[in-house]
Image (cartoon, grey):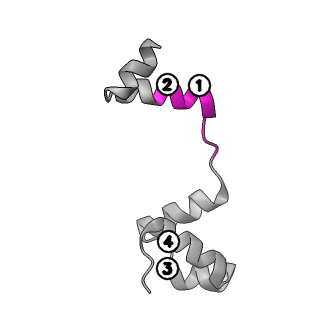
Amino acid sequence: MKLLEKAITGDIRAVAEIRLSTEGLKLRTWRDDVIDLLRQGLVTPEVIKDELGKELAEELLAATVLHRS
């Protein structure tokens, strides 16, 4: 209960501890790697569209906040 009280009042460490104990560590996927490459400018959106197709590329581009209509 103390941890919850701390989280409610804005203690980020308490929030992180609750999340970790309920969700566990996040595993990285190849999608995370592609998103990182896009964010770093090491690969272009056009390359991602060519390699992965438009639908999946749009999803990944939206995650990078690079997506433009």
> For mark 2, what is the residue?
17
Hey, what amino acid is under mark 2? Glu
Q: Is residue 24 visible?
A: no
Q: CA gap, disc 3 to disc 4?
A: 13 Å
> For mark 4, what is the residue?
62
State the SS at label 3.
loop
Residue 38: % across, % down: 48, 69
Q: Nearer the viewer, mark 1 or mark 3?
A: 1
Q: Which one is nearer the viewer's eye here, 57 or 40?
A: 57
Q: Which one is nearer the viewer's eye here, 33 or 8?
A: 8
Q: CA gap, disc 1 to disc 3?
A: 37 Å
Residue 18 included in the magenta stretch of the image: yes
Q: Is residue 62 above or below residue 13?
A: below
Hey, what amino acid is under mark 3? Thr
* Residues in magenta, as a range: 16-27
Q: CA gap, disc 4 to disc 1?
A: 29 Å
- Tag 3 near tag 4, CB within 8 Å: no
Residue 8: % across, % down: 37, 27
Q: CA gap, disc 2 to disc 3?
A: 36 Å
> For mark 3, what is the residue?
44
Where residue 12 is drawn, which disc sits there? Answer: none
Residue 32: % across, % down: 58, 57
State the SS at label 4.
helix
